[in-house]
Image: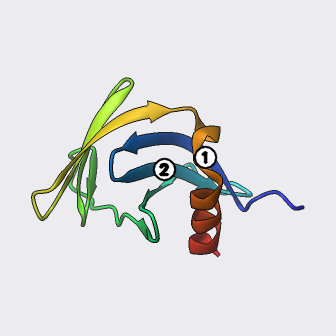
Amino acid sequence: MSSPPYSVLNLFESPRGYLVEIARMPRTSPESEWVWIERRRATTLQPLDSGEGLAFEEGILRLDGRQGELRWSNGRSEALVRRAPQALPPPLRGLLELHLT
């Protein structure tokens, strides 16, 4: 089995899903991507050049060590807890790989 075309840099879990920071492989730039994964859907967050840290079209991400918050532009909020990168459940890892291809 070949290695995935990405590396998981950070993984955060919430009651509704997972937020994954990935780097595409081979890594040609220092930029990473953030992907929100729910039961049957993966969405790449689209960054904004706001100068406000981690701002995306879909919402604002605030990180504080082992926890964080993703506040969606529709007002919904996700409380996030950092997990080990390998802790992404296999079915969701498969969904992520499918999303990235």
The earlier-in-sequence mark between 1 and 2 is: 1
Nearer to me, 65 or 83: 83
Q: Quadrant of residue 68?
A: top left
Up-down: is 22 above or below 98? Answer: above
Circle 1 SS class: strand
Instruction: Answer few, some or many: residues within 10 Å of disc 2's Cα (few below 14, many 20 plus, some between 14 and 19).
Output: many
Q: Position of residue 39 (x, y in %)?
A: 45, 64
Give the amino acid type for the residue marked by disc 1 in the picture. Val
Q: Position of residue 41 (x, y in %)?
A: 44, 71
Label at residue 37 = none
Label at residue 20 = 2
Q: Position of residue 51 (x, y in %)?
A: 22, 48
Marks 1 and 2, Cα distance to the nearest angstrom?
7 Å
Is mark 1 in CB contact (under 8 Å) with mark 2?
yes
Q: Quadrant of residue 46?
A: bottom left
- In the picture, which quadrant includes the N terminus? bottom right
Q: Is residue 62 visible?
A: no
Give the amino acid type for the residue marked by disc 2 in the picture. Val
Circle 2 SS class: strand
Nearer to me, 42 or 73: 42
Label at residue 8 = 1
